[in-house]
Amino acid sequence: MESLATSVEFQMSLLLFVALGGYLIASRINQSAVIGLILVGLLVGPSVLGWITYTDFVRALAHLGAVILLFVIGFEFNIRDIIHPRNFAIALLGVIIPWVGGWWLATGFGFDSASAIFVGTACTATSIAITANVLKELGKLQTEAAKAIIGAAVIDDVLALLALAISTDVVGGSFSYISVAIVTVKAVSFIVIAAAIGIFGVSRFLVRLDATPFVRKYPEFIFIFAMMLAFLYAMGAEAVGLSAIVGAFIAGVSFKDVELHQSRSLKEGAEYLQIIFAAIFFVSLGIIADLHAVTSEILFFLLALTLVAIVTKVIGCGVPAKLAGLCTKDSLIVGFGMAPRGEVAMIVALIGLEAGVIDQGIYVALVLMSLLTTIITPIVYRNWFYRGEYCTYDASATCSDAGK
Amino acid sequence: MESLATSVEFQMSLLLFVALGGYLIASRINQSAVIGLILVGLLVGPSVLGWITYTDFVRALAHLGAVILLFVIGFEFNIRDIIHPRNFAIALLGVIIPWVGGWWLATGFGFDSASAIFVGTACTATSIAITANVLKELGKLQTEAAKAIIGAAVIDDVLALLALAISTDVVGGSFSYISVAIVTVKAVSFIVIAAAIGIFGVSRFLVRLDATPFVRKYPEFIFIFAMMLAFLYAMGAEAVGLSAIVGAFIAGVSFKDVELHQSRSLKEGAEYLQIIFAAIFFVSLGIIADLHAVTSEILFFLLALTLVAIVTKVIGCGVPAKLAGLCTKDSLIVGFGMAPRGEVAMIVALIGLEAGVIDQGIYVALVLMSLLTTIITPIVYRNWFYRGEYCTYDASATCSDAGK
């Protein structure tokens, strides 16, 4: 028999209760729900109250939340929105410039060259979950800036993976062009094959299946199938070294044009799952960060690193966006939208720590930099770019009216 | 870093993949989805293939599934459907007769008196999850028989709790009327207070909240609130010794008449969650049972116990139903509907095993009896009482046309 305090029912009600508190905080400070949820996570986590720690249960639900969130976001996108020369340019410069910036800063702080390489690598990866959710809240997923951000973020994930593979090899003294080529081929092949199977195979199969007596009898079958595919693609992405959420996103993209008659809407169902589990995911981002680990020495490095991380993404992604024809405001939206590092930088930091390449101080700084860059984007969006706007779902929004 | 095989994404995709297989099995043998899911759970669990074991992760998701399922079922019920003299009569005889039957059988097999008391107690509790889901699949939740079953099952849970408290005290030699009275008062008070707060407090609060600018800004708030309440009530029920699912059911009943305008439908959202997690719950029932533990000696006891468990519920619940004015067919539907013991009997068995009162053989027999009674109801329903009927949602179905 389990004790009540560790029961699933207790933990779920506590997490959701805390999430409700996050909404109240967000409303109070007039910010995105994401900010309220992360702040309430910091409050109830080890940093302040210590009510909730990052247990396996919280971690599992947070994973579900991140996967389901990107699956839902995927429903809004065409494959053509991703494969666009502009997005490749944004992603490429948005990886190179932050890498150089992070490496330069760490070297300037007197860290050894292996540490500096890991700091640079941790600065490369964009985590799209936060930005995508804020754009969704604001009803701005169909704007040019949003398409550039999401498309570039998927490509960015491949490039960040390459950066990690190269860094690990260089630090370990086993760098070879062949291993880099293998990583690249695996990641790109996965994305291409998964998208092709999803769009041309699975989505057509589901439309046909929807018309069968089998689905008339068991109408929930197709929804279970779709969610299974989201997790299967997430797992596949992890298996080739990409983040799981990239796989979930591709699964969502596959279902964009699936119209069902007998079964209920896949998108609607996934959105209900997302409401519950993405809220827990955002709360968990606050729980995982322990502010007690910040000493005065690393505080200075942390602040400098966060500044460098934001500025290098704003320049590295904003400039190619501007050159590709977006207006200045949209280019800045792209730059700030690519700034959150989220869980990808945390994973890089963890790999570095476990390999003994970086020490505890750098590790904490990387984790908190990741959190800070994540918090800043929704604040900047809501207060500078989309001031006073709520969920309007204006599909025709273009650059000129985005600034109203 | 976790290995891929233990990643959340891998486990979720495997569980959902297996669930899809369960639907195919159910369709193949023309049975309720529940049967297919339990059978596929037996297949992939330790009994046959050993692909999936009952890990903390599976257990957590299964708990979520059971809670969400009963929450959704609750939406279909009025509080008046439960508090009905007929339901009290069905519940009371449906606890006494199975207790006597189980005790008598165990004594007849030569078990000591403490073991016999625990076997009797394990026979008392009805687990409503399976029956309710099958009735939901068949669109029969609004029939008189269904109302009698669900209402009686909630009362039954209180009585089974009392039986467990009494048995534990008697076996431990510390029986007192006062402790029995305390258990009763706690359980009944919880149900009455929770229902009153839910129906008169929370549901009205949510309707008012739905009209505020706050909810216009954060439309998902009310859905998170409702799910939080489901888990909070489930936890409360556990805290007073009832099963968690009784609490979730009362939370659902509270929301029956909540009409929202700005927020999306609570029932619809909970149903999407239920599709995914209840499927995992049913699969887990198959996974938890290890058929290897069945030796030839206990096989005979198991079969006799299962027969007694079913017959005593059919008589103990069917006869009062008939006396209360239901037709013979509906009375049999009530009797078989109350037969599944589900997780409640498994918990009683676990308590007995951990207290050293029953041995491993009796324990396995109780767990498997619980599973067999669970499997038999959907088979009997689909093949005898509701032959060839699928989800028609015929709210006007009465006794006479239930047999078409």
Image (tube, coloured by chain):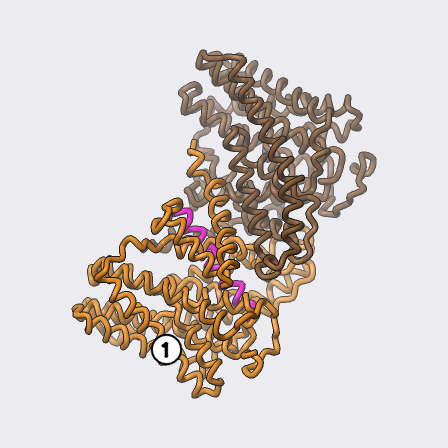
Chain colours: A orange, B brown
Residue most extreme to the front: A28
Identify whether A1 is placed above or below A52. above
Residue most extreme to the right: B400
| Numbered range of the magenta stretch | A55-76
The residue beneath circle 1 is A94
Q: Is residue A232 visible?
A: no
Residue A201 screen position, x and y as percent = 55, 68
Subunit ID for the residue under disc 1: A
Relative placement, left or right, of A107 versus A302 is left
Q: Quadrant of residue A340?
A: bottom left
Q: Quadrant of residue B152?
A: top right
Q: Main secondary structure of the magenta part?
A: helix
Identify whether B112 is placed above or below A387. above
User: Residue flagged by tag 1: what amino acid is it?
Assistant: Gly
Query: As rendered, which of B173 and B319 lies closer to the eye?
Result: B173
Q: Residue at x 57, y 78 (%)?
A: A404
Q: Residue at x 54, y 74 (%)?
A: A78
Q: Quadrant of the N terminus of chain A?
A: top left
Query: As rendered, which of B38 and B398 lies closer to the eye?
Result: B398
Residue A313 screen position, x and y as percent = 37, 76
Query: As rendered, which of B376 and B172 lies closer to the eye?
Result: B172
Q: How many marks?
A: 1
Question: Would you say residue A59 sits in the magenta stretch?
Answer: yes
Question: Would you say residue A342 sits in the magenta stretch?
Answer: no
